Image: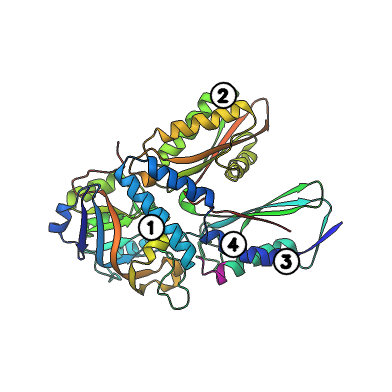
Amino acid sequence: MARLNIKTPLTKDKIEKLKAGDIILLNGTIYSARDAAHKRIMQLIEEGADLPFPIKDQIIYYMGPTPAREGKIIGSAGPTTSYRMDSFTPKLIEMGLAASIGKGSRSTEVVNALKANKAVYLSAVGGAGALLSKRIRSVKIIAFEDLGAEAVRKLGVEEFPLIVAIDSYGTSLFER
Amino acid sequence: MRIIKTADIRDKIAQLSQQACIKVDKKITDAFAKSYESEKNPVAKYVFEQLIENYKIAETENIPICQDTGMVTMFVTIGQDVAFKGEAMEKMIQEGIRIGYREGFLRKSIVNDPIERVNTGDNTPAVIHYELVEGDVFNVVIVPKGAGCENMSRIAMLKPADGLPVIEKFVVDAVRDAWANPCPPLFIGVGIGGNFEKVAFLAKKALLLPFDERSETPYIAKLENDLLDEINDLDIGPQGFGGQTTALGVRVLSYPTHIASLPVAVNISCHAMRHIEFSL
């Protein structure tokens, strides 16, 4: 069980080294998007329109935070359950998405896409939103502001604690 | 006849709905500390460390334990010798949630319609269950329950001939299929009997029973123990990465049923099992 410090962007050379069960501390930029934002992003892709952020080598975090208190940049910010995004994820991985962060297992289609395109699925600890919020250093809403908690946010993270749940070789921590 | 002001109910709900999302029951943190010690899986231990640290940060820094501050379920017990003064109680309960979620900086997670899906912006409406009892009591349990675990709940109308073995299988299958989705270590509520809607209600209500106690009915107490053992043998572990702690408690409630029916329901709660209770 290695403990690794990783910087974004998550290029293929970094992905190759990650093994299911590794604990990583992520530094850099990630983008939050969950159910409603995924639906809109897929619509934009279909229309051939510009996306809120580049997909290639980037990381999507399935998260919708609680509102920030005065003087804070974000509230509780833990992962939501990933399977609800399973129908959208293979397409994004084909477009170059390096990783998604959520909780819970993924469909066979997602695992196959991870293998075929050298991408990973990372898990944050579900229900650790207070702890995770402390590792977020910057927040900017970049799309779909009308969705409130579900808006797309560009997040700057520092030592963001994650577990490699499914690696680019298809090995999954959820399988026994 | 005892008179209760509905404005007092509103104020209490506004205050306690915030607390329920920030402070976890001490019995849960104690159980965590124990499980952490006995857990052998290194990833499971790592997850426990994060969860324990998270609860501390949440409480000391006033940050919700989880970003999903839930759809509020409320169990309201009303003694028949109580009368209410002021605006309609239902309205004031919802107003309490509205204020609590605004002032507590909690997430507004409710959409107006299951298909149109426009956020109501204030986390209302809550789902409220009223129970009428003897005397002049007035008691409320507030349960802000996240969707990650609520979505993993299940109901079945079994055959009377199925009996306990099929009930057990049904509950264990639900937990296995849910795997990491409901944020284990879990609390499991099981309802048996009644009819279609009653059994779902029982399953959720069973979550409110003390998780470290057992039913006074011997066969139910045995079922609770057997289910807990079987679930912890699944090797799901905290967050699904393996380990011996998949559930911390299983409680079962039953109710008389029809000669042709054996309804069963399972309601799953995440590790925080957020709830808070008050009486007026």
| Residue B199 left/right relative to B55 | right
Q: Amino acid at mark 3?
A: Asp
Q: CA distance from mark 3 to mark 1?
A: 36 Å
Query: Are the residues under badges 2 and 3 in a single subunit?
Result: yes
Task: Please say if A94 is above or below B192.
Answer: below
Numbered mark located on residue B8 in the image: 3
What residue is pinned by disc 1?
A79
Q: Secondary structure at mark 3?
A: helix
What residue is pinned by disc 4?
B17
Q: CA distance from mark 2 to mark 3?
A: 46 Å
Mark 1 touching mark 2, by CB under 8 A? no
Query: Are the residues under badges 3 and 1 in a single subunit?
Result: no
Query: Are the residues under badges 4 and 1 in a single subunit?
Result: no
- Which chain contains the residue that carries disc 3? B
- Residue B226 lies in the magenta stretch: no
Q: Which residues are magenta?
A: B101-106
Q: Earlier in the sequence, mark 2 or mark 4?
A: 4
Q: State the image quarter where residue B82 is shown.
A: bottom right
Mark 3 touching mark 1, by CB under 8 A? no
Q: Nearer the viewer, mark 4 or mark 1?
A: 4
